[in-house]
Image: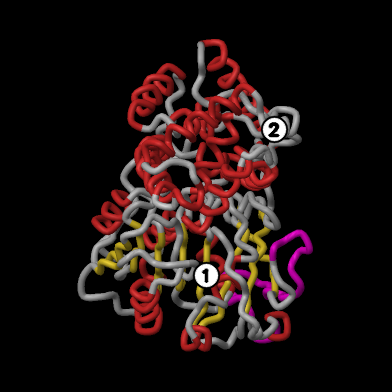
Amino acid sequence: MPKKVLRAATIGVLVASLAAQLTVPAAAAPSKLKWGACPPESAALPQVGCATLKVPLDYSKPNGRQITLTISGVGSLAAKHALMVNPGGPGAPGIGTEQMVRVGLSQELYDQYAVFSFDPRGVGASTPVSCGDTSKLVKHPALPCTPANAQQEAQRVQLAQRIAAQCGKYGKDLLPYITTENAARDLDRIRIALGRDKLDYLGYSYGTKLGATYATLFPQHTGRMVLNSVVDPLVSTYRTGFEQNPAFEARADDLFQWIAARDKEYHLGKTATAVEALWDKLHRDLAKKPAGGRAGAAELEDVLASSLYTDDLWSSLADAIVQYRQGDPSGLLTITDQFALQSVDPGLLAYNCIDPGWPRNWRTWHWDTSVSNRRAPHFAWSNTWFSAPCAFWPVTPKPSVRIGSTKVPPILLIQGRRDPATPVIGARRMQAVLHGSRLLLEDGGNHASYLQQQNPCIDQSAEKYLLTGRVPTGNVSCPAGGS
């Protein structure tokens, strides 16, 4: 998620100064949470405090090997409410999210809520999973995402196999236990350590799956829960990718139309079709001659996908294209370096690839991607390569929690109608399985927009829910927000 500029006001009381107030109930653990400075490599500001908590690696063996969670918090531990935040991913570090959320709250919420986050198991400052040094595996410019022939596809498949094998070599002790269910059980340990009977929670993107899993497992301890940009609870992670592909294609058309409407500024085409044709020519040109020796066709596809998460990035992308056409690749290279040169993400793969439903026969992947490519030619193969190591994952998949229960209290869902990363069908299905939940449906396509975009319709409805615990009487339709 893009981060907002922090307001000048003090972010909150230093959590470390209140350490004496926070103890873990004896039934949960014999120790106290000791608050202090956050790890220097984390994204936390100095006003944020951090603590560590031991939890079982394997919850079926609670007295066996323990791993460490690092928790972050901002605000007073005596606050009426404690809001736990997960930024998504999966496998994204949470430390640093707490202050971003708290400064976006209204004054009334700011006064009532302390905000917490954590690096989930396997990630960052919590016990991390490793795939070793993968810098030699992933090269840039990368091979084209859409293979021109069987040899290019085979090279991509071999890379996925090597990544999976190396993750298995370095992470074999942890990988079987890096699951959404275990992360949800970790959340409950954190709730107990914070001395709270209920878990108040804000989850973005994958964080909606984590929150809904928690609510299913621990409905009696589920408090006020906001799920923004909702993951589909009824399909496998493999199938989720094929839901995303046409949604990304539709969102790309929104971008091309936006650029076309500003042809007097950018001169990239007067219609969406003309802009798309220019984009495809740029794709072909970069395939032949990568900009700066690192921004090729594959990297351009990653840049496009990343830019579709929020229209805040559209002007920068259009400016970069204009500059490139004028002989200056610096803007395009800056965007490429920011969004398209990622290496292997061990945490993301660990959480995703342990899920059931990944085909082990590559022919299934090839067929499904080829079919999807007809509707989503800019994204189908790129999305497949993103998850391809899961076809060869060295750990046996674990059954997922079946999300949903009549015991779950009402939950507030927030969804952009044209959000490409979590298509709207997922939010509708989540509402169907979380009985009594309500859906705030925004006309825009920005991903994880609550508190990141100025939208009074969304913000006021969510604020009322967080203050009262009462969801709206029915679903709410909201106009697209600004930034």
**Residue 289 tag number:** none
Front residue of 431/380: it is 380
Q: The magenta stretch spans which residues?
A: 19-43
Height in image: 300 above or below 464? above
Between residue 220 and residue 167, name the one nearer to us.
167
Amino acid type shown at disc 2 = Arg
Residue found at x 56% / y 42%: 303
Residue 472 lies left or right of residue 204; in this view the side is: left
> Left of 11 or right of it: where is 273?
left
The residue beneath circle 2 is 294
Q: Is residue 26 magenta?
A: yes
**Classed neighbour count for the residue bearing mark 2: other residues with Cα under 10 Å, few (<14), some (14–19), many (≥20):** many
Q: Is tag 1's residue or tag 2's residue first in the polypeptide sequence?
A: 1
Residue 159 visible at all: yes
Spatial CA distance of label 1 from label 2 is 39 Å
Residue nearer the viewer, 435 or 348: 348
Position of the N terminus by quadrant = bottom right
> Tag 2's secondary structure?
loop
> Which SS type dominates the magenta stretch?
loop
Evaluate whether residue 401 shows in this view. no
Which numbered disc covers residue 84?
A: 1
| Residue 400 location, quadrant | top left
